[in-house]
Image (cartoon, rainbow, N blue to C red):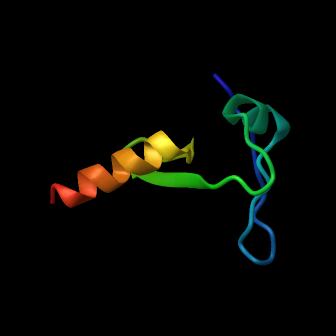
Amino acid sequence: MIFEVAKILPKYQITLPKEVRDFLEAEIGDKVLLINTEAGILIKKLNEPLIQKIKDSQSKE
């Protein structure tokens, strides 16, 4: 489990701590998905399979 703190910057941006970037295998220019859950905000790195899964679930609605 990773437990890190990020600070909100003046333009409401945050920097992902190195441990989180490493876990997500995030690189500059990558996009992340922020999901509101009962437990809090979940951050997932967007990749093509995940984007397709989201599109598929939206088309079923």
Query: Which residue sits furthest right?
Result: 18
Rendered view: 61 above or below 9: above
**Residue 18, percent across and down?**
84, 37
Instruction: Point out the residue furthest to the top here.
Output: 1
Question: For the point 73% across and 42% down, which residue is it?
Answer: 26
Q: Position of residue 42 (x, y in %)?
A: 51, 44
The C terminus - image quarter: bottom left
In this orientation, which residue lies closer to the viewer: 37 or 18?
A: 18
Measured along the vertical axis of the image, is residue 29 above or below residue 37? below
What residue sits 67% from the left and 35% below the top? 24
| Residue drawn at (75%, 44%) of the image | 5
Q: Nearer the viewer, residue 25 or 47?
A: 47
State the quadrant of the N terminus. Answer: top right
Which residue is at the far left? Answer: 61
Answer whether residue 3 is visible to the viewer in this image.
yes
* Image point (25%, 51%), residue name: 57
**Residue 51 falls left or right of residue 18:** left
Left or right of 17 in this view: 37: left
State the image coordinates of residue 39 (x, y, percent, origin top left): 42, 41
Residue 47 placement: quadrant: top right
Q: Position of residue 43 (x, y in %)?
A: 56, 45
The count of marks equals 0
